[in-house]
């Protein structure tokens, strides 16, 4: 199923309660959530490739993502958002809490929660520079990855080129103001997950690992969410761990679908 030009691209598999899977920057839903395909025995999986990521469109923005997700939530669903995609999921869940069976956000860049934190501020400054300088999408992507302490990538898989073009023009996540009160009052189960980043290089641990875990702690406390840290994982703990899938299955059971 495809939405009108500029909207998200949707792919579905499985049967059961709906589980919306929303990807982050420089990615696509099908690649981000490969490890979740096994959940098709429990859920009707809805892979949401965000607007602008499958063909050229307007600037990538979490507000537009939230509006698209509210439209997709025409019936109750579990919602999972990775990285930048988690921002739209948080906003949409606050707007239609009666349609949310559960919410899981994985390493969301909710940097606005800790504006005075020196490590968060330092990373935001780096990222502002990356997007201000612009340039070829592959170069923006390489600068972006390097800003988080990872080695600079030297090649990009061709099928991800549209995703790189989209994220190269995304709105900075540090601008997002999240509806913390509405989310805290919402009655659906909430989970904020990260990797512990301990298996990664020291630069990645001291930049990305520190910031994402500190932000996740602040978010979980602010919205009264369960906090999960997956040992041995980095920015995508759901890709290599059964723990996240087990939590999602338990959510389906506890909510009765």
Image (spheres, grey):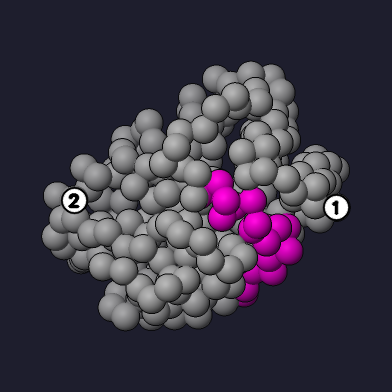
User: Looking at the picture, how far across and down is residue 188, in whole percent?
Assistant: 40, 69
Q: Is residue 209 above or below residue 166?
A: above
Nearer to us in this view, 68 or 141: 141
Going from N to C along the chain, the mark reached first, 1 or 2, is: 2
- Whether 239 is drawn above or below 180: the answer is above
Residue nearest the viewer, comparing 222 with 168? 168
Give the magenta-colored segment's residue range. Answer: 163-181
Q: Nearer the viewer, residue 163 or 41?
A: 163
Q: Which residue is mark 1?
A: 116
Per the image, the residue denoted by label 2 is 40
The part of the image, by quadrant, that contains residue 77 is bottom left
Residue 86 horizontal/vertical position (percent): 52, 57
Number of numbered tags placed on the structure image: 2
Q: Residues within 10 Å of mark 2 (few under 14, many from 20)?
A: some
- Residue under the point 31% across and 40% down: 34
- Choose top left, top right, bottom left or bottom right for residue 115: bottom right
SS for tag 2? helix
Q: Residues within 10 Å of mark 1 (few under 14, many from 20)?
A: few
Position of 73 with respect to 120 (left or right) is left
């Amino acid at each position: 199923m495809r939405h009108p030009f500029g909207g998200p691209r949707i792919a579905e598999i499985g049967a059961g309660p709906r589980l919306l899977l929303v990807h982050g920057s420089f990615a696509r839903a099908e690649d981000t959530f490969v490890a979740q395909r096994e959940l098709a025995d429990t859920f009707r999986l809805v892979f949401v490739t965000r607007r602008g990521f499958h063909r050229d469109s307007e600037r990538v923005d979490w507000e537009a993502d939230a509006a698209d997700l509210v439209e997709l939530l025409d019936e109750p669903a579990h919602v999972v958002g990775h990285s930048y995609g988690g921002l739209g999921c948080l906003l949409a869940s606050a707007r239609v809490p009666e349609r949310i069976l559960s919410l899981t956000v994985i390493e969301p860049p909710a940097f606005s929660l800790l504006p005075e934190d020196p490590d968060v501020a330092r990373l935001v400054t780096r990222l502002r520079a990356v997007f201000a300088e612009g340039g070829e999408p592959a170069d923006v992507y390489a600068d972006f990855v390097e800003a988080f302490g990872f080695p600079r990538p030297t090649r990009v898989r061709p099928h991800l080129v549209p995703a790189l073009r989209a994220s190269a023009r995304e709105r900075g996540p540090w601008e997002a103001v999240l509806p913390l009160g509405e989310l805290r009052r919402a009655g659906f189960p909430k989970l904020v997950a990260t990797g512990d980043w301990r298996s990664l290089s020291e630069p990645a641990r001291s930049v990305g690992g520190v910031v994402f875990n500190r932000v996740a702690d602040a978010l979980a406390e602010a919205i009264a969410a369960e906090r999960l840290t997956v040992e041995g994982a980095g920015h995508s703990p759901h890709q290599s761990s059964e723990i996240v899938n087990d939590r999602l299955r338990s959510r389906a059971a506890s909510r009765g679908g």
